[in-house]
Amino acid sequence: CHTFSGSWGYYRDEMSWKTPEMLIRVLLRSVCSGGNLLMNVGPTEDGTIRLIDRAILDLMGQWAKIFAEAIYEPRPSGITVENKACDFILQKDDVYYLFCCDLPMVADPNVAMVQGGDYTDVFTLDREITEITWMDNGEPLTYAQEDNRVCVHTEPFCYGRNLVIRVAKIHTK
């Protein structure tokens, strides 16, 4: 169980709300270990939900709608992503879902900060991959699979888009 702010109930002058990014990360910490998450929203004294709480719920709902297929039914795969403590893989039947954390946004360096880094996820998978695509836009990812070792080039978000955690859908035979 988790709260949207620093308290379990309603406080008129509450100003310590957690960001949607923080709450999505809390949700995924639960999902990656096969759990569920109960979110506590304290209603006001007249029983209504505050505008800020509704806005946060709406943003979390938008994120969950994009990635619903990857978060509701798949279970932990037991596969570890090398050197990426936050990245993880869930599985449902022959489909795997690679959750990629901390991907920056790329842009023209004249209009935005461009972050460098290693955007390759490496893991072991004993099934042949047929395709890997981003769930948010359907674009294919480049990857290499040699024996059971897989290297996936996980590209950053395009300018103007940041979904906190990006999910790639891995199809296998």
Image (cartoon, rainbow, N blue to C red):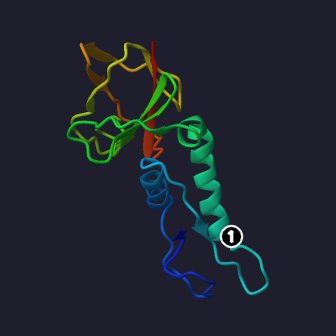
Residue behind mark 1: 51
Q: What is the total number of numbered labels drawn onto the structure image?
A: 1
Q: Position of residue 25 (x, y in %)?
A: 43, 55
Q: Name which residue type carries label 1.
A: Leu
User: Is residue 18 shown above or below 147?
Assistant: below
Pick whichever, 141 or 2, lies toward us. 2
User: Is residue 46 shown above or below 122?
Assistant: below
- Name which residue lies at 43% across and 47% down: 32
Pick whichever, 159 or 170, lies toward us. 170
- Name which residue lies at 42% across and 50% down: 33
Q: Position of residue 97 (x, y in %)?
A: 45, 32
Q: Position of residue 115 (x, y in %)?
A: 25, 42
Tag 1, which secondary structure? helix
In the picture, the quarter occupied by the C terminus is: top left
For label 1, count other residues whose C-alpha is less than 10 Å away and answer few (under 14), some (14-19) or many (20+). Answer: few
User: Is residue 103 shown above or below 122?
Assistant: below
Please identify the quarter of the rendering in which residue 162 is found. top left
Q: In the figure, is residue 149 to the left or right of 59?
A: left
Q: In the figure, is residue 113 to the left or right of 48?
A: left
- Name which residue lies at 53% across and 32% down: 136
Pick whichever, 118 or 82, lies toward us. 82
Please identify the quarter of the rendering in which residue 107 is found. top left
Please identify the quarter of the rendering in which residue 132 is found. top left
